[in-house]
Amino acid sequence: MDRHIPILSYFNYLSVGGQIRFAGTILRAPADMLYVGNENTVFQHIKNLYKLYMPHFFKNAVLEVKYKGFFTLVNIDYKGNFVVMLPEDSEEFLIDDVRMRLVVKNFGYSVYVPNMYHQRLYISDYKYGLISDIDDTIIHTGATTILPRLKQIIFTRPYQRRCIESMPEIFRLLSSDGAKIFYVSNSEANLFPVIMTFLRRHDFPQGACFLRKNKLLSHFLHRKKKTKRSQTSHKMRVISLILRTQPDKKFILVGDNGQWDPVIYKKIKKNFPGRIRYVFLRDIHDKISLKRKAWGGVPVIFFSSINDIKSFIAPRLNSDFN
């Protein structure tokens, strides 16, 4: 396999009925493919992105998974994706505790887990959940149009990406109040190292990150017109999964009004009555200072100024958000 080895390029986790649903993607790549350090030049950044969007996949492979004495075998699909259920024996889940070995044609290869993932912590005991979009909600991307988004992805290194002002502070405030964060985005899993680097760089609270499946470079060269279904199906499926598997928790939804978040969140509120406590929607057009509405009794706050949302949240900690 020369210098190309199995790499865990993306993963997420979720508590499901006393088990941990651990999902991820295994790629065949050089170990330095996922390196996104702040000393990287723009050229190195583009080179790594190219590798991320031109990956090699394993065929007819089986994944051996060990976790605290538990052992199982799981198949991976033709794009390296897998889902495995692990025993949940504590409130903490560290990626370091998972040992993976890929078996291809009777040969076993240890799966490399990049250093940047080792600090991810899973906590199943929390007061309420916060489900947040990423693009133009906590990070400036220009995701409403394809060209500004591609420009951001290609030419802006992770350490240079601009954060929405004071969003890390608000998320830390809610996290310290007992919220567990779930990051849900339409971005593809190829960008997982970039997104994780950004979240750590700006000190956002730890949380599972649910992205769309990997895309190949050819996808962007032969793009089809996006339909409403293609734009909403991933987030609807993931948020519905989170709410179904956390039946005793209430949630706050955070997004923006640039694309489909209002449509998705309205449908989630309808499908899961009584489960959504608040909805916060950032106005990316910067025309709304503060606007309060209600969707069937659920308070909805549109905001441009972060100070407005902070002044709304602060007096409600330890009471309304529970």
Image (tube, rainbow, N blue to C red):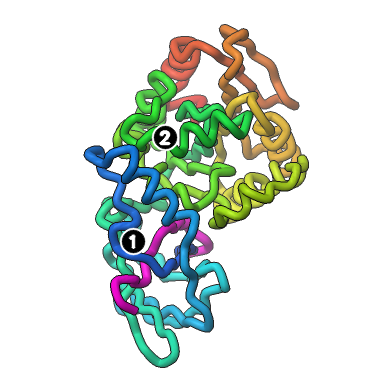
As drawn, the label of residue 120 is none
Cβ–Cβ under 8 Å for marks 1 and 2: no
Is the stretch drawn in magenta largely helix, strand or loop? strand
Q: Earlier in the sequence, mark 1 or mark 2?
A: 1
Residue 67 appearing in the image: no
The residue that disc 2 covers is 155
At x 40%, y 25%, the residue is: 163
Q: Is residue 11 magenta?
A: yes
Relative horizontal placement of residue 160, taking residue 260 as reference (left or right)? left
In the image, the segment drawn in magenta is: 1-18
The residue that disc 1 covers is 90
At x 42%, y 56%, the residue is: 51
Q: Nearer the viewer, residue 134 or 39?
A: 39
At x 29%, y 51%, the residue is: 35
At x 43%, y 57%, the residue is: 10
- Cα–Cα span, label 1 and label 2: 42 Å
- In percent of width and height, residue 144 lies at 62, 29
- In percent of width and height, residue 132 lies at 52, 36
Disc 1 is placed on an element classified as: loop
Q: Nearer the viewer, residue 3 or 132?
A: 3
Mark 1: amino acid: Ser
For the N terminus, which image quadrant?
bottom left
Q: Is residue 226 above or below residue 21?
A: above
Mark 2: amino acid: Phe
> Residue 311 lies in what quarter of the image?
top left
- In percent of width and height, residue 316 lies at 47, 20
Relative horizontal placement of residue 85, taking residue 117 as reference (left or right)? right
Relative horizontal placement of residue 257, taking residue 170 as reference (left or right)? right
